[in-house]
Image (spheres, rainbow, N blue to C red):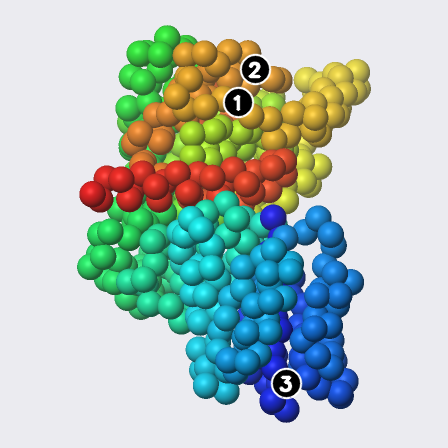
Amino acid sequence: MTCRIVLAAEDRKENAPLAGLADQLVSCAATVHVFLVNTGTQIPSLPFEGCVSATAIDAVELLRGEIDAVVPADDSFILTAFGNDDFMTSMQRVAESLETPLCACGNLQSEQDSLFPTLLKRIRESIRPTPYLVGVSMKQSRYVELAGRGVLSLDPSDGLLIVPANCGIPISEMDAVVEKCTDFLQKDEAEGGVLKASKSRAMIDLQEQLAARPEICVIDPFHSVSKVMDRSVFTALMSDMEASGVRAGVVSRISPTPYFTAKSISDINVFTNSMHAAGLEFPVIMKPCVACGVKGSHKHAIVYNKEGLENLQFDGLPACVQSYVNHGGVQYKIYVVGKKVFHRTEPSTPDIHPDQTPSESVLFFDTLESLQSSLLEKNFELNQNTHSAASEDQGKNSRDQQLLDIDEPFGGMCVGTIDDVQEVNGGQAGLDFHSVMVIAKFLKDKLGLTIFGFDVVVQEGTGVHFVVDVNFFPSCKKIPGVEKMIRTAMFERISAHKRSSF
């Protein structure tokens, strides 16, 4: 959903404030049209280069025709005006002829230091019913990407006026704050190479403001998000999932992943003894306990055998260590948006079999980078004594078929809704939808998150589903129409918070 804004200003020979406002709107992915009225001069292109159009006209009476010329007939837009009282009176007539509300924002000069928050307030005041004012705290690059897709659009037509949390409007005046707190973690400089993350000063300040304003809805509170910020904490929480599977009658298809937390890898015997005590066998996968927010948190290692521990350089300690599960080189990305659950598939790391001889005993990879199975597989050489050329061809055909199976058309498929777990059946390419819904409901109840994602692998041969990762407020790319559903989930969450506050 694109937000189209028309800025009409009485020309005062000073375009800098208006150009600055236009830049801020463009940075929020708004489509901006600028009109300077009562001027006979052309507008320099440079101050308004981010706008779709910038036009100088001689009289306000010409404005409607100019708007009709640049705004598509079926598109809605927000009409704003800057100028003196006489100009506002004329602009009101234009708004009435266009059958659209007018956001009257005063003189550019008098409002120079607060144009953006003033405009946002006027937009909100002009709409009935009044939309929720939602501030978003996340890194700029993520905000721009989500705003461009319509998730964080300024368009208030669905009851949400979404703005940057630092837009100049006090937090106390907002109805809700979306806090992507994992964007504001910082790496601790700890001794002994330990990877740790802590809150940044900006994150602490915002959370202190929110703690003093319980009437403000937070999507989502830090105490909920923190459960998925440490892999050892999250993995321990997952130990209750098997009981949830028993109650739902799918225990044979859901299992928590046995693990132990390795604080050091200097003593191989201690490491392997801890492995065996936890019921683990080689190969194992090592993941930093710090799950997000700092450099290195997404770098994993698959340790093929005991020899792989010798001289192992792993910068993600303490680490969550788990047995590696063969899963056909496919993982399922599951997204929970409010009460709706979606999934898509993507390539994953390859299966590892006992009769394979590794060229290297450790395989490192970063989950934020695109996994290329061909590059991963070259780390393992087939033992030519036990594999014929025919079996190699058969394995290649199997891998090719897997890639065909996961290349759509199932990407972005809606599995079901949280409230209808017992009604969901069926599946796709090994993924059991009912099991996915049981896991999704379990996690939503345990975590209390509004929008989150989790990754599932299905064990080859057994069909058992393992949850291998969870993340807060994922981008949900490649899910058709998800932008509107994210906004709906936020609206419903804020509305529920408002009701519970009374």
Q: Residues within 10 Å of mark 3 (few under 14, many from 20)?
A: many
- The dot on residue 415 is 1
Q: CA distance from mark 1 to mark 2?
A: 9 Å
Q: Residue furthest bottom?
A: 13
- Horizontal and vertical percent position of residue 346: 62, 33
Q: CA distance from mark 3 to mark 2?
A: 62 Å
Q: Amino acid at mark 2?
A: Gly
Q: Residues within 10 Å of mark 1 (few under 14, many from 20)?
A: many
Instruction: Name the residue carrying label 3.
Output: 11
Q: Nearer the viewer, mark 3 or mark 1?
A: 3
- Horizontal and vertical percent position of residue 37: 67, 80
- Horizontal and vertical percent position of residue 270: 30, 38
- Horizontal and vertical percent position of residue 390: 79, 16
Q: Amino acid at mark 3?
A: Asp
Q: Residue at x 68, y 51 (%)?
A: 75
Q: Amino acid at mark 1?
A: Val
